[in-house]
Image (cartoon, grey):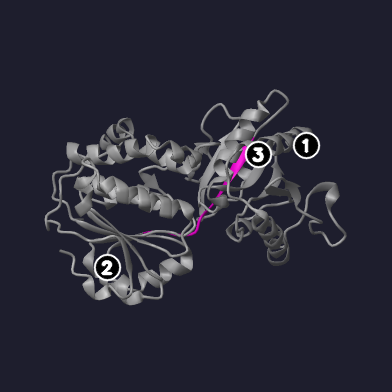
Amino acid sequence: MIHLHSLSQLVKWHISPTECMDSALVPFTRNLCEAVTGFSDFIFKRNELRQYPEVIALAFWFRAANLKHIRKRLTDDESPKTIHRVFHIAPANVDTVFVYSLLLSVLSGNYNIVRISERSGEITWLLVDIFKQYLNTQQGKLLQALVCIVEYPAKHQTVTEQLSNWCDLRVVWGGDDAIRAISAIAPHTQQVSFPNRYSLAVINANEQTDLALLSRAFLTDVLPFNQQACSSPKAIYWLNTERDVQDRFWKIVLSQLPTINHNLSVSNKVEQHINFQYLAASQGLKMAGKSQSKNGSFARVVSVGALGHCKVSEITPAILEAHSGNGLIIEQDIRNINDIACSTTLQTVSYFGFDDKITLEGVHKRMVPLGKSLNFDVVWDGIDLLQAFN
């Protein structure tokens, strides 16, 4: 039994600790795989969940065929497992990411506690409810001893300390400040962290480009999580793309937006303009072309439905690091692929209009086709989670 009853006044257990063995399970056994794919099937059978594309994408990722593919990535190392218990600290702004981390750890044969924030969004609470229901099914019973979910404020550091002392590995998703604060608690605990990152898109389009397809791929990457996911592009680099093609692209984006479910609201529109003004003042953001005002800064953000975009003369890493998302797209025209602003905090480059996977000179970053930036992978931000969980 996990003896955490002394914390009962400080935490809310959504899925409580139960009896569990001290020894680790063998990773990717048939029973573990069937329990996880059963969760995927459980989601697919719920028609009401089809309105949440990020939840359907999660279920699709954990389907049986993909688990077989993931299983092949395990090495034949016969050394014993060193990780048995994992403490996951989920981000408040990307609702589904904790489930990827959690279920990969389950597949690796670990016992897990997930801490979720009281600031979490609708999808997080929906997933917690789905877990509760699934654990009460015959196929989900195996996970009852492997999955616990707890909610408490970050200020309760004694809780974080006790859970950190319980685990063999702490997995932290969040902002740089939050990760620094958590890292100072029980610093002896082995930890992997996923801090602030920015991502961008590079598009090479012309008169023959299927702009409807381009627009749909772009919105697939930008709309979920209100552009808060680290892999959601915050900028478009237009590579040798004429202005009239760009204008037609934005018109098609405007026409497609009403057909796609998203959570961008009026408050996000306000945040777009606030963030833009902040970037202009703090980063010297300057407009491009004829729309430049006398003081050299942008006159306004061009509204495209729930989104906003603005063309600048130069995008720097500092601009994108300070970019808060909320549907604001910064754009720059470039003539060479290596004009892209790269830094250690650049995570994903999404590309469209290239025959092959693109590369940047001397830069090793995640490169994916536009429309695939939010697709999870076992190796995330350079960290091999399968290796970390074993």
| Position of residue 154 in the picture relative to residue 312 (left or right) | left
Q: Decide if residue 62 is on the left or right side of residue 56.
A: left
Residue 251 makes an appearance in the image: yes
In the image, residue 349 lies in the stretch drawn in magenta = no
Along the horizontal axis of the image, is 258 left or right of 143? right
Label 3 neighbourhood size at 10 Å, few (<14), some (14-19), many (20+)?
few
Q: Which mark is residue 359?
A: none
Q: Secondary structure at mark 1?
A: helix
Amino acid beneath label 1 = Arg
Residue at 61%, 29% (x, y): give it. Answer: 213
Q: Which residues are magenta?
A: 193-203
* Residue holding disc 3: 258
- State which quarter of the image contains the N terminus: bottom left
Q: Foreground mark, 1 or 3?
A: 3
Pointer 1: residues within 10 angstroms few (<14), some, or many (20+)? Answer: few
- What secondary structure is the stretch in magenta mostly built from? strand
Tell which of 275 and 335 is nearer to you.
275
What residue lies at 68% left-to-right and 47% top-to-bottom?
Answer: 307
Q: Are marks 1 and 2 in contact (CB under 8 Å)?
A: no
Residues at marks 1 and 2, CA–CA distance in whole angstroms: 54 Å
Which residue is identified by label 2? 163
Would you place residue 356 above or below residue 381 in this image?
above
- The residue type indicated by label 3 comes to Pro
**Residue 262 is drawn in which quadrant?**
top right
User: Looking at this rendering, what residue extends furthest in the top direction?
Assistant: 208
Q: Is residue 372 above or below residue 161?
A: above
Q: Which residue is under mark 1?
A: 243
